[in-house]
Image (spheres, coloured by chain):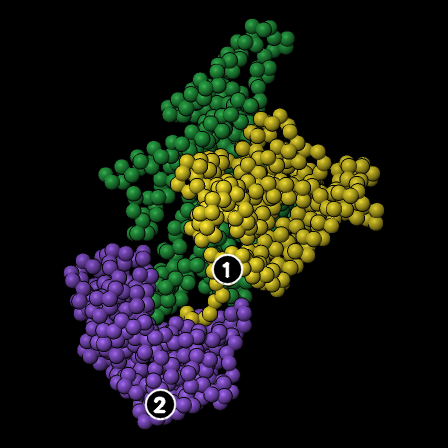
Amino acid sequence: MTSEALLSVRNLSIEFSTERGVVRAVDDVSFDVEHGETLGIVGESGCGKTVTALAVMQLIPMPPGRIVSGSIRLNGQDLLALPERQMRNIRGRDISMIFQEPMTALNPVFTIGNQMVDVIRRHQPMDRASARRRAIEMLEKVGIPIPDKRLNEYPHQLSGGMRQRVMIAMALSCGPKLLIADEPTTALDVTTQAQVMEQIVSLQEDYGMAVMLITHDLGVIAESCRRALVMYCGQLIEDAPTERLYERPQHPYTQGLLRSIPRIRRQRLETLPVIEGTVPDLLHLPPGCRFADRCPRAADECRAHQPPLIDRELTRVACFYPGARDD
Amino acid sequence: MSAPSATAVPGDTGRSRGSLWSKAVYKLSRDRFGMTGLAIVLVYLVAALGVWFGLWGQGWSDVTGPMWAAPSGEYWFGTNVIGQDIFERAVYSTKVAFEVGLVVAVLSTLLGAVLGALAGYFNGTWIDELVLWLKGVLDSIPFYLFVAALAFALKGYAYSMHVAMIATFWTTTGRLVRGEVIKLRGFEFVEAARALGVPEFKIIFRHIIPNTFHILLVQATIVFVAAIKSEVILSFLGLGVKDGVSWGLMIAESTQEVLAGQFNNFIWASVFLFGLVMAFNLFSDALQDALDPRSVA
Amino acid sequence: MELLQYAIRKLVSGIPLILGVTFISFVLMVYFGPDKTYELLGKNPTQEQIEQVRHQLGYDRPFLVRYGDYLRELTTLDFGHSDSTGERVNGLLGRTIPISLALTAPGFVLGNLLGVLLALVAAYHRGGWIDKLIMGGAVVGMSISFLIAIIAFQLLFSSSYGLNMFPVRGWDVYSLSDYVRYVTVPTLATVFVALGYNTRFYRAVIVEEMTRDHVRTARAFGTPPWKLLYKNILKNSLIPIITRIMFSIPLVVISGSLLIESYFGIPGVGKVTYDAITTGDQPVLKAVVGLTAVLFVLTLLLTDILYKVVDPRVSLK
């Protein structure tokens, strides 16, 4: 954790007031994103990974959301302290975000060109014609054939993969330093998934930007991320370089996640191991480790106290009994 | 967004319907405006029941005072052009308003429930087409002309206004119920009932309509308000309440008085009407909020 | 060409609606309506005279023949002469419909325009005190009867108890300034009553649109909130807005003006139709009801075409 990180999140806690009570969706999360690196954030749905990303963009609807504490610094500048007007200049220019559903993320009643030109001219002083040329250029970059024709089409005329490429082109059109990709391939079919991921990785190298890749798919992380964070119930429970996360996962939850990936190499037709039990209700969290009820190693200590994040060689892990798999 | 939500599983209604209702009641009870509205409506209801049981408001037609008497201890709100007590008339009209509102709300909602459920259950068949056609036709006939025509066709029948409202106000309920039933039809409990050979009319009335009750309740409150408001305009046009007095008739007779500078009749009838409609609107809004999980804040 | 085919298909599919409206109205207004026979006869008519008048009025022909005649009149748009005044029905409508339109159009347009505007303001400040103020005002507005609003506005603006600035009633319009004098108070009342309902409806539509994914996308690219509203949200909200406006048009033209026309004594088509019902002037009634139904079908078609203009996903199939 160096102070020159591009993005530096410290002790971030976010709450939502719901009809049934206040829910802490993100609890004391700290991490860095270095310049040009790809950071994966992985976890089940509801673990707080999307909320964390939206917090970086400051797109959390408030109310019902509320950032309780913490700081989010981009190049040293605290985004949480910025007035909304200045934050708007950062969105799309310094940090861009692409979303899970390419079907609904684009406005159905405007053409692709109209929406791209809007984004480009929002952040760069350009007339309509040059913004259009820039849009065509960007569409070409993300591998869309006949871009000048696509520009006059509406989102519903494009396939899901094409739409996600358009989103990527839009996101990169102002040359952001950080791209947040929230499950960018989940809604796409398998072959398109791979193509779109490759596209993101290759563009990242071209542009030298950092990518925060949010996913529930450990396979995607393995292919494209240098480092990965694992979240569970709003907390960061493991932070490790990708290789190490795969070779020597420290947290029992991470180990369980890894075991639940089908191993194609082994070609064995066993039933997939899944982690037993269910995620606790965020309204009624246990006092100790939130994974304790599902954990094979849980001891009394785990149920009584929350394990802090500890450094263990290259890994940060929140577990009293970290280490090698016990099977 | 990952904030947890407690969405009821639509298939197993036995359990989730109960919890849905208790949640709705809880939510409703915490809605300050809604509960204020309900309290005011209950006050009106007591006033109406008092008239019904002959406790008060019986002197509405007696000519007891002088013309246009000012408000006093004897005539709280003053008297009208022929010397009738405005307070007595305003209170008596509460009963008439509830009669109109309840009769129209209950019957038109029932009609909407039955026709909507039939159309939804037999979605795509001639029954559906017929109901949709009827709805389209009724929505296309100007309302006041319809009421006027019906009033004459029924040769001055005292309840022709009620009949006209019931015949036209069911269409929105019908549309909403139809949409809901089309959704419900695909659920397991309906499939199961059908597989067990339960007769279709029984499925519709025992299993489907009860599951649209949240729509019916909200629609009934909306129709109640619409009926009371329509009564005022119809009474002014001479198509409204025939025997008795209503806020609408009071306002209609006040249109001459106000030009002579006599405002008591107009003001008090308006205040009584506004109070009930406003209270009902607040209650209806709160009800909608509590019952429709999809409604936007 | 595609559009023309679609239009024809749509108009043909509107025929059952027209048949339904005309049939129900025919049964109610013509078959069971008031009998004009004795009104047109002198004292102590002979049986022969009675039959002659009944024949003139067409009462002696079978029900279906009379309904068939009605449909024929509707297709040729020739409804004959008024039973009461002898005026040609087309002439009567040509005289009264423009008055009704002139009377209701300003209120209708303003009521919807201001409604959308207030809804945008409320949605922009969603959850804040401005929103609460506007929506509270809407509920209060919705709770006030149209008749009460008319009387109150008339007292306020047209009587010696108020500002006494406008004529109390009537419609003596020969110039633009006359028009403004006579149309102001009815318009104010109409707008006042429509605004509550319109604002609520439009706000709900806009707020629902605000929660869409593409709005979040636009925000994620730094779009400022006012631009979100007028560009990214307003156009998407237009389908329900158009639907509401379009479908009130046929009723506004005929029925919506009835109360205003009766109250202010304005000789518009609403008043004429109402009088026709009470006196049993069948040719006028048949014309008004039939034309409303035709107008409804045309509106359905026009609305579909507008959908297509607003939303590229809509196809005219």
Q: Is residue C130 left or right of residue A214?
A: right
Residue highlighted by disc 1: B293
Q: Picture coordinates of residue C49 (x, y %)?
A: 56, 7
Viewer-nearest of discs 1 and 2: 2
Amino acid type of the residue tagged 1 in the rendering: Pro
- Please name the color used to draw chain C: green
For the residue labelled by badge 2, is the local secondary structure a helix, a strand or a loop? loop
Residue highlighted by disc 2: A323
Amino acid type of the residue tagged 2 in the rendering: Gly
Judge whether C99 appears above or below C83 on screen: below
Query: How far, Cα to Cα, is label 1 from label 2?
Result: 46 Å
- Asked whether residue B291 is in view, the answer is yes
- Please name the color used to draw chain B: yellow
What's the residue at 31%, 57% (across, down)?
Answer: A108
- Asked whether residue C122 is in view, the answer is no
Q: Chain of mark 2?
A: A
Disc 2 crowd rating (10 Å Cα; few below 14, some 14-19, many 20+) is: some
Q: Picture coordinates of residue C210 (x, y %)?
A: 41, 62
What's the residue at 30%, 85% (across, down)?
Answer: A245
For the residue labelled by badge 1, is the local secondary structure a helix, a strand or a loop? loop
Q: Picture coordinates of residue A101 (x, y %)?
A: 32, 65
The C terminus of chain A sits in image quarter = bottom left
Q: Chain of mark 1?
A: B
What's the residue at 30%, 34% (across, down)?
Answer: C8
Chain shaded purple: A
Judge whether B93 appears above or below C225 on screen: above
